[in-house]
Image (cartoon, helix red, strand yellow):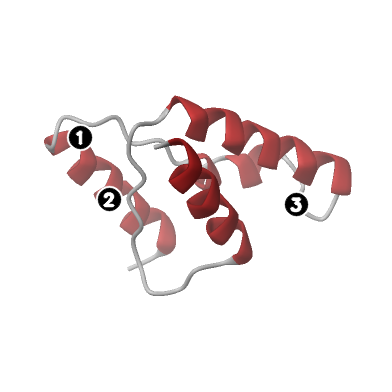
């Protein structure tokens, strides 16, 4: 299964449980250039703002990136 297909199934699964899944990593790469430091900073800021609105963080998969580690750290402090 391609990443985008897996992400779509995760998003649909979350909706079944009455949650609104937020997955900016699914679309921000199409809008912002991760290799551009200013655009990466903008994406990380956007992610942090969205996370602040959430009351749950669900982690899928067995690989935790450095960005995910930071999101988990932030979520533990606010959820």
> Which badge, 3 or 2, is on the more N-terminal residue?
2
Distance in Å between CA atoms under marks 1 and 2: 9 Å
User: Is 46 placed left or right of 33 in the picture?
Assistant: left
Label 1 secondary element: helix
The label shown at residue 15 is 1
Q: Residue at x 73, y 40 (%)?
A: 32
Q: Residue at x 59, y 54 (%)?
A: 70
Residue receiving disc 3? 34
User: Is 65 placed left or right of 8 in the picture?
Assistant: right
* Residue 34, percent from left and from top: 75, 52
Q: Report the residue that reaches farthest toward the bottom.
A: 62
Distance in Å between CA atoms under marks 1 and 3: 28 Å
Label 2 secondary element: helix
Crowdedness near tag 1: few (<14), some (14–19) or many (≥20) residues, C-alpha within 10 Å = few
Distance in Å between CA atoms under marks 3 and 2: 23 Å
Camera-side residue: 62 or 79? 79
User: Is 62 placed left or right of 67 in the picture?
Assistant: left
Crowdedness near tag 2: few (<14), some (14–19) or many (≥20) residues, C-alpha within 10 Å = some
Label 3 secondary element: loop
Dividing the image into 4 quarters, which one contains the C terminus?
A: top left
* Residue 4, percent from left and from top: 41, 54
> Which badge, 1 or 2, is on the more N-terminal residue?
2
Q: Residue at x 45, y 47 (%)?
A: 76
* Residue 75, percent from left and from top: 46, 44
The label shown at residue 59 is none
The label shown at residue 10 is 2
Dividing the image into 4 quarters, which one contains the N terminus?
A: bottom left
* Residue 31, percent from left and from top: 68, 37
Residue 62 sits in quarter: bottom left
**Are the two marked residues, 3 and 2, in contact with CB atoms closer than 8 angstroms?**
no
């Amino acid at each position: 299964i391609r990443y985008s297909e897996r992400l779509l199934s995760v998003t649909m699964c979350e909706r079944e449980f009455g949650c609104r899944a937020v997955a900016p990593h699914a679309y921000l790469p199409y809008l912002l250039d991760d290799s551009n430091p200013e655009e990466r900073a903008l994406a990380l800021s956007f992610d942090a703002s969205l996370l602040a609105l959430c009351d749950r963080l669900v982690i899928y998969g067995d690989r935790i990136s450095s960005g995910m580690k930071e999101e988990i750290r932030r979520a533990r402090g606010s959820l």
